[in-house]
Amino acid sequence: MTGMVEQESTGAAEDGARATLGVGMVGHAFMGQAHSQAWRVAPRFFDLPVEPRMAVVAGRRAAAVEEAARRWGWAESETDWRKLLVRDDVQLVDVCTPGDTHAEIAIAALEHGKHVLCEKPLANSVEEAEQMAAAAADAAERGVMAMVGFTYRRVPAIALARELVAEGRIGTVRHVRAQYLQDWIADEDAPLSWRLDKQKAGSGALGDIGAHVVDLAQHVTGERVTGVAGLLETFVDERPLPADGGALRGTASSGRGPVTVDDAAVFLGRLSGGGLATFEATRFAWGRKNAIRLEVNGSRGSLAFDFEDMNVLHYYDATEDPRLAGFRRVLVTEPDHPYVGAWWPAGHGLGYEHGFVHQAVDLVRAIAAGTQPEPSFADGLQVQRVLAAVERSAADRSTWTTVEES
Ligand code: SOE
């Protein structure tokens, strides 16, 4: 069955026939676990037009993928992801593998008429991202949808920030200050994760976490980064080999290997509306665990967010009486805030995993409605072009570099 939602009896007489969307997920490490949780929880808290069904998870090692299926609630497991493409009970393929396999899996799935959710960054190169965006455009004509997982868009405070900018509450955007700060490899003896291997990950901090803040800056402002000047640095160029396949915050074994990606990226950007942006992405910021900081200054006010205090958005209204004006700390935990009404009573707060649930909800609703989910593969390609421009600029030693247009 291609791209369609399957009509299936739930077996519960009072429910009658209920439409389901069979999901097949590829990869079951950190992102696979976050996505599993989302597929399981989404239909319980949100009213969905179709019920996601966790049909099958794929992974290369039989014992590990069987255990993942059992633990995370997948009905079956497979050791060959290609088997998912020919299963009638899979309508959506969820790609949670390292970047070097995104293009192959996503394009094959789209060609087999499966909707696709693909982890970020979309690909390891602009060329691959172009092929993926082209495959997605073709598939969309057949009603088959593709979405890239820039999950932080679905944090309620970020969604609220976007609404406020769109409503004109801070006026014309003058500045964006965007940082993604982590410290999980600040220790020089932290093992060589696959995220430090260019072959697997494409780039380092730039693609892994810089991609998120490029997407967030563009998403919140509704603008595009049109040009950049950047620096990339690798502080530690050799590390102990991992004992456990290169998991995030994994353990080291004996032997050492080269780091082939950037450890940190710093760049300036010009926004399509004329504003200026600064970006910083690093895993060497001791004490910063997952600090995604976004500040937007406009002609009438400012907004500021930090993921380490993710239920809060700071808002400054420059039109207020100057004697009383000041940053307002908005607790984004009210039923009127984006996504929040589906969860707990006001004030009880959400966490990291909820963004993945909201992503699943928005994707399922778009598929059921036959509309293009966002961010699309074209959006993922555009972010990839920004990353590539930063790499070119850094290689040329800070030459101003225009971001290519599609
Ligand atoms: C590792 O830096 C990582 O897991 C990223 O790959 C994710 O995209 C981010 O959400 C958390 O950190």
Image: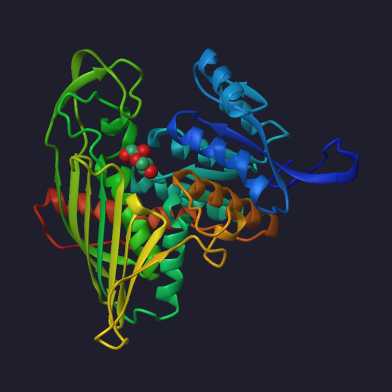
Give the farthest residue toward the top: 254
The image quadrant of residue 198 is top left
Give the farthest residue toward the left: 397
Relative to 381, residue 221 above or below: below
Residue for point 60% across, 52% down: 361
Mark yes or no: residue 341 visible: yes
The image quadrant of residue 245 is top left
Q: The C terminus lies in which quarter of the figure?
A: bottom left
Q: Position of residue 330 (x, y in %)?
A: 40, 67
Q: Position of residue 127 (x, y in %)?
A: 36, 46
Color style of the picture: rainbow
Residue for point 46% across, 71% down: 163
**Residue situated in front as seen by the camera: 278 or 274:** 278
Q: The N terminus lies in which quarter of the figure?
A: top right
Residue for point 67% across, 59% down: 370
Q: Position of residue 345 (x, y in %)?
A: 58, 56
Mark yes or no: residue 16 visible: no
Relative to 143, residue 249 above or below: above
